[in-house]
Image (cartoon, rainbow, N blue to C red):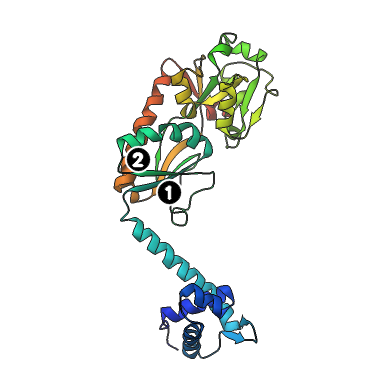
């Protein structure tokens, strides 16, 4: 038996008919007449030597051979369509699609979008905020910025920042919080996204590094880091803020970080893209710009002492 593939046109007709379970709908999708589509499927059945459909009065149904062939043709044409989209995108150097978590998008990317547009007017930057791990082929995404512990060796990955946390509050509230001991008398805002990793970076960890044991059961809790920061900027309490997300608020004086201790998180932000695409003009331009912007947060490290969250957890 020959393994020679039949006509792709005939296979495409079968795939559409099997997906719709209707010759008429498949013909409309492919912009051919029902008679032409039926002819293509007939030729496929002739090559195969057995029917693929049972023709009923007002419907069709797949035979055993049709049920065997349908998944492979669907996957094959989906793979071809994806490969074609990716090949076409290689010629498009004017658009860059970036995905990042909601907190990083709202607190880091969005406030700087105008700066990037001024520096690179030739590139149209598009954001896709979400926590789902990006499938670069399926989602047509160029770059992902992700916060986590492990890197995927199959992708190009570059650490963006040494992420550390420290208590942050409004300048008005800071007038009443002169030392870490004073945290016992103010609401503590909890960013629960920091507790989801192998080594939590939360209030108990920071207080342990400061040599304190306080009741941390009180205070509002937020699942998103940007919401926790917004609450702190509204004066609702003291947040254990992540420097990467709070840089603009610290620079503008909306928040202050008065204590010297910073706990370095196990998780960190990474710049991620498919291997080989990091040298594409728009990806390389965005990567260089992001790293130059990230460098601004290093100024807040001056005069601080740092402890790794993993070391504090290990000493428990």
Residue drawn at x 50%, y 34% is: 106
Residue 277 coordinates in the image, percent (x, y) = 34, 50
Q: Let me know if residue 264 appears in the view.
A: yes
Camera-nearest residue between 145 and 309: 145
Residue 223 coordinates in the image, percent (x, y) = 62, 35
Q: Earlier in the sequence, mark 2 or mark 1?
A: 1
Q: Which residue is denoted by mark 1 in the rendering? A: 153
Residue 89 coordinates in the image, percent (x, y) = 35, 56
Residues packed near mark 1 inside 10 Å, few (<14), some (14 to 19) or many (20 plus): few
Q: CA distance from mark 2 to mark 1?
A: 21 Å
* The label number, if any, that marks residue 286 in the structure image: 2
Camera-nearest residue between 249 and 155: 249
Residue drawn at x 38%, y 46% is: 96
* The label number, if any, that marks residue 91 in the structure image: none
Q: Is residue 245 left or right of residue 228?
A: left
Rendering quarter of residue 173: top right
Decide: is 204 above or below 139. Answer: above
Q: Is residue 59 left or right of residue 3?
A: right
Camera-nearest residue between 277 and 35: 35
Residues packed near mark 2 inside 10 Å, few (<14), some (14 to 19) or many (20 plus): some
Rendering quarter of residue 191: top right
């Amino acid at each position: 038996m020959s393994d020679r593939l039949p006509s792709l046109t005939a296979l495409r007709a079968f795939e559409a008919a099997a997906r719709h379970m209707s010759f008429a709908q498949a013909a409309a999708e492919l912009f051919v007449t029902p008679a032409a589509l039926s002819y293509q499927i007939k030729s496929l059945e002739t090559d195969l030597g057995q029917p693929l459909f049972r023709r009923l009065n007002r419907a069709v149904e797949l035979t055993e051979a049709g049920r065997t062939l349908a998944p492979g043709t669907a996957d094959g044409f989906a793979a071809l369509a994806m490969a074609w989209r990716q090949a076409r995108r290689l010629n498009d150097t004017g658009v860059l699609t970036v995905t990042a978590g909601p907190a990083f998008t709202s607190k880091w990317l969005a406030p700087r979008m105008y700066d990037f547009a001024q520096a690179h007017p030739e590139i149209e930057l598009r954001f896709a905020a979400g926590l789902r791990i990006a499938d670069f082929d399926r989602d047509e995404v160029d770059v992902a910025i992700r916060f986590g512990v492990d890197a995927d060796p199959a992708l190009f990955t570059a650490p963006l920042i040494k992420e550390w946390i420290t208590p942050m509050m409004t300048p008005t509230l800071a007038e009443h919080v002169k030392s870490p001991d004073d945290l016992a008398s103010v609401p503590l805002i909890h960013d629960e996204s920091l507790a989801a990793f192998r080594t939590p970076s939360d209030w108990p960890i920071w207080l342990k590094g400061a040599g304190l044991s306080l009741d941390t059961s009180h205070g509002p809790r937020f699942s998103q880091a940007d919401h926790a920061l917004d609450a702190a900027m509204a004066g609702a309490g003291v947040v254990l803020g992540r420097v990467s997300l709070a840089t603009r608020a610290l620079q503008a004086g909306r928040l202050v970080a008065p204590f010297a201790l910073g706990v370095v998180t196990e998780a960190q932000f990474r710049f991620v893209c498919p291997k080989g695409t990091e040298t594409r003009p728009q990806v390389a331009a965005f990567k260089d710009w992001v790293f130059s912007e990230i460098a601004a947060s290093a100024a807040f490290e001056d005069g601080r002492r740092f402890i790794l969250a993993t070391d504090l957890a290990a000493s428990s």
